[in-house]
Amino acid sequence: MPIITPRTFRGTRDFLPGELLARRRILETIEEAYRRYGFQPLETPAIEYLEILTGKSEENDKLLYEIKRARGGEEETAESAIALRYDLTVPLARVVAQYPELPRPFKRYQIQPVWRADRPQPRQGRFREFVQCDADIVGTESLLADAEIIALTYEVLRDLGFEKFRIRLSSRKFLAGLSEFITGDAAHFHSFCRCLDKLDKIGWEGVEKEFNESGIPANRAREIVTLVAASGGTHPDFTSVLRIVAQNPVAVEGLSEIEMVFAAARGLGVSVEALSFDAHLARGLDYYTGPIFETVLPDYPHIGSLSGGGRYDGLVSTFSKQSVPATGTTIGLDRIQTALTEIGKFQALASTTQVLIARFDADGVAFVLELAADLRKAGVRVEVWYDDDKLKKQFAYADKQQIPFVIVAGTEERARGEIAVKNMRTTEQKQVARTEAVKEISAALRTI
RNA sequence: GUGGCUGUAGCUCAGUUGGUUAGAGCAUUGGAUUGUGGAUCCAAGGGUCGGGGGUUCAAGUCCCCUCAGCCACCCCA
């Protein structure tokens, strides 16, 4: 029989225990924060009908993993065609339309994997299968909701140990107005955004070249956007920006929304250096309609955004005659992990076991099993050694797994009604009466 | 999707101008007086040199194709 090479599909990964334990910790931190803001959990299927997923964003349509057919089954018909979801926002919009009885505001969080047929680049935290942590507020147009989403993002990143990060805020509405104001034609909006977004990377010469190549009339663009950009940052001068775009009512409205969200987010405790108004933040899925935001690490520009979100008041209406406003964000678990690893704060754990009960003779089996049962009843995480191996091997295992305590109960100890408890960190070992074992171990565990 | 780089043990790599049974470190397993780990020492297992074809007396080493991985761009979490 030929051996099949063990491997994982490109852009997907196995998570071995050490890494997974650390990932779980990150998830717990995120989930805790989401709950503090009153979000309730939701899960949806990995597979959706193709028609649910397509048509929301041209880029994403290209990244869909379509599922062709079941093995030995029939080819899917056009109506029953299916695909793996590429985000959690579209499924949420579907749910909102499908269950009108849900409360308003509907605040849900959702932590599940999504799939995109991208070309993976691990260093940038980019994969084909990755976990998104979404928090969305559905059913209100209030910009307080957008501000809360920003504050929530801020808290999550702080809780995770990030010290220097930047939440960049802009607005689709403002950009639409700005685009119209500069180009004189709303039709240029998309390419205008795409070019503008590259400003940080390629500078003005590059952007102007892109404008030309995209056929965007942008004779005054440099002057205007330079002024707007100069008025942005962590201490935005909204009055100056207003003066520049005053002739365009859409831009004015978008700007006032940014200003409100900005102020409310600060009011919710977001620190000055963590939030900035970036007029040239133009990226984002096509379904955004209002404020948009993303989080980046200024010191690690190669890592993609850690979070991204915004207001999408039109998305639900693709599934319903009702129009339902919504805003929200997604935090990328894998980007977070990539970033924490780079910063040196991603600490893999070997094991969560607290006590290993060693053994080395057949006579002691009953004694050891009873001890394990007692400890587990008290909530202690216990492993029992299975084979008749040398103690050396058993201790080496405890050491490798970073198990803090090892219990040895050989004939001598058992005869005296005692056990030996060794603290692997201090190497200290002491004799404990079997009757006091649970109490002693529990107390010892509290000291570490 | 566009462009570039790489592909030798589980991992990180070395392999001289193509020449006999392909090496090291780490990891794994076993041992160094039989009830105690992290150090050291000894030993062992593990590779059809990504796959296929070609040039040659001879290819890990040269050429072609292919697959895979990585990086930049695109886009984004």
Image (cartoon, grey):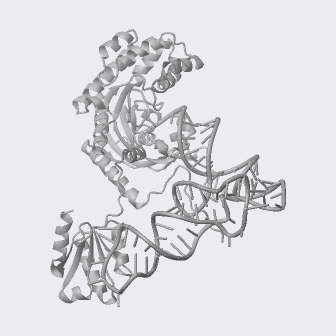
When the figure is inspected, residue B21 is found, relative to residue A259, above or below; the finding is: below
Q: Position of residue A344 (x, y in %)?
A: 36, 47
When the figure is inspected, residue A64 is found, relative to residue B47, above or below; the finding is: above
> Which image quadrant is residue A377 in?
bottom left
Q: Quadrant of the N terminus of chain A?
A: bottom right
Question: Which residue appears at 22% of the width and 75% of the height?
Answer: A421
Question: Which residue appears at 50% of the width and 11% of the height?
Answer: A184
Q: Position of residue A297 (x, y in %)?
A: 38, 36
Q: Quadrant of the C terminus of chain A?
A: bottom left
Side of A171 where A68 appears, left or right: right
When the figure is inspected, residue A438 is found, relative to residue B68, above or below; the finding is: below
> Which image quadrant is residue A89 in?
top left
Q: Does residue A221 show up? A: yes
Side of A329 where A442 appears, left or right: left
Side of A431 where A339 appears, left or right: right
> Viewer-proximal residue, A39 or A415?
A415
Q: Position of residue A84 (x, y in %)?
A: 52, 47
When the figure is inspected, residue A204 is found, relative to residue A314, above or below; the finding is: above
> Viewer-proximal residue, A336 or A300?
A300
The mark tally for this picture is 0
Q: Does residue A56 show up? A: no
Question: Which residue appears at 21% of the width and 66% of the height?
Answer: A445
Question: Which residue appears at 49% of the width and 46% of the height?
Answer: A122
> Viewer-proximal residue, A27 or A355?
A355
Side of A24 where A442 appears, left or right: left
Q: Position of residue A407 (x, y in %)?
A: 26, 76
